[in-house]
Image (cartoon, grey):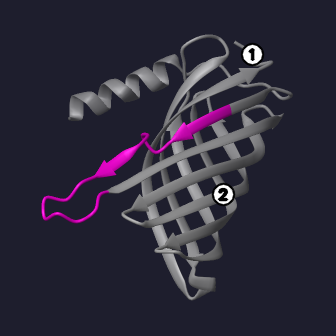
Amino acid sequence: MKKLILLFALFAFGTAQAQINKGAWFVGASSALGFTSYSYKSGGSSLSNFNIDGRTGYFFMDNLTAGVTIGYTHASQGSSSAGLTTLGIFGRYYFQGKIFGGIGINTVSASYSSSGSSSSSSSTTIPIEAGYAAFITDNIAVEPSLVWTSGDTDGGNSISSSFAVKVGFSLYLNRNK
């Protein structure tokens, strides 16, 4: 495991020479590793979960971008389902044009339905991310990242947090090579 981490660090720092210039744009999409489905041996109903996030940003300084994000998550179990729509803003800084860290603030609207009844709620979340932009062409990057999110739920009466491994693809326009 230590060798794998050392190889990743050498690759990341050895190839990270470029910067992303002021005036560049990026458009990307990511997911918490796609579709997840759980089936229980005890005969309970299965649980399915799917999420996708999209974002676009503008580099108003070299290596520093700000933008908007939108996302959707759907979960279902038996006759119950939930849909979460996320809308927010974010900032991201790129170290040597490849390793990035970012923070955002989101509004999450949730709708729930179960056996003919439905309800809805909203909350605010703050995601903090760290990742690597692995450029496979001059303008396209695969972006694995770790995301920790904290937020209020139940009208601010409780705090929740989550940790996710995400993988995304981004298109960078007007980027220095």
Query: Residue 61 occupies which quadrant of the picture?
Result: top right
Image location (x, y in percent) of residue 165: 42, 45
Q: Element type at marker 1?
A: loop
Quadrant of the rendered image containing residue 9 = top left
Q: What percent of the width, then of the height, locates residue 21?
A: 78, 25
* Residue at the image point whose x is 31% and y is 29% from the top: 6
> Of the residues shown, which amino acid type is indicated by label 1?
Asn
Category of crowding for the residue at label 2, using alpha-carbon neighbours closer than 10 angstroms: few (below 14), some (14–19), many (at least 20): many
The outermost residue toward the left is 42
The residue at which mark 1 appears reads as 176
Q: Secondary structure at mark 2?
A: strand
- The residue sitting at 65% across, 58% down in the picture is 85
Three-letter residue code for mark 2: Thr
In the image, residue 84 lies in the stretch drawn in magenta: no
Which is nearer the N-term, disc 1 or disc 2? 2
Residue 97 at least partly seen: no
Using the numbered discs, state the Cα–Cα distance from disc 1 to disc 2 in whole angstroms: 31 Å
Label annotation for residue 44: none
- Residue 66 vs 16, above or below: the answer is below
In the image, residue 41 lies in the stretch drawn in magenta: yes
Range of residues picked out in magenta = 28-46
Residue occupying the point 77% across, 38% down:
57
The residue that mark 2 highlights is: 86
* Residue under the image location 36 percent in, 27 percent down: 8
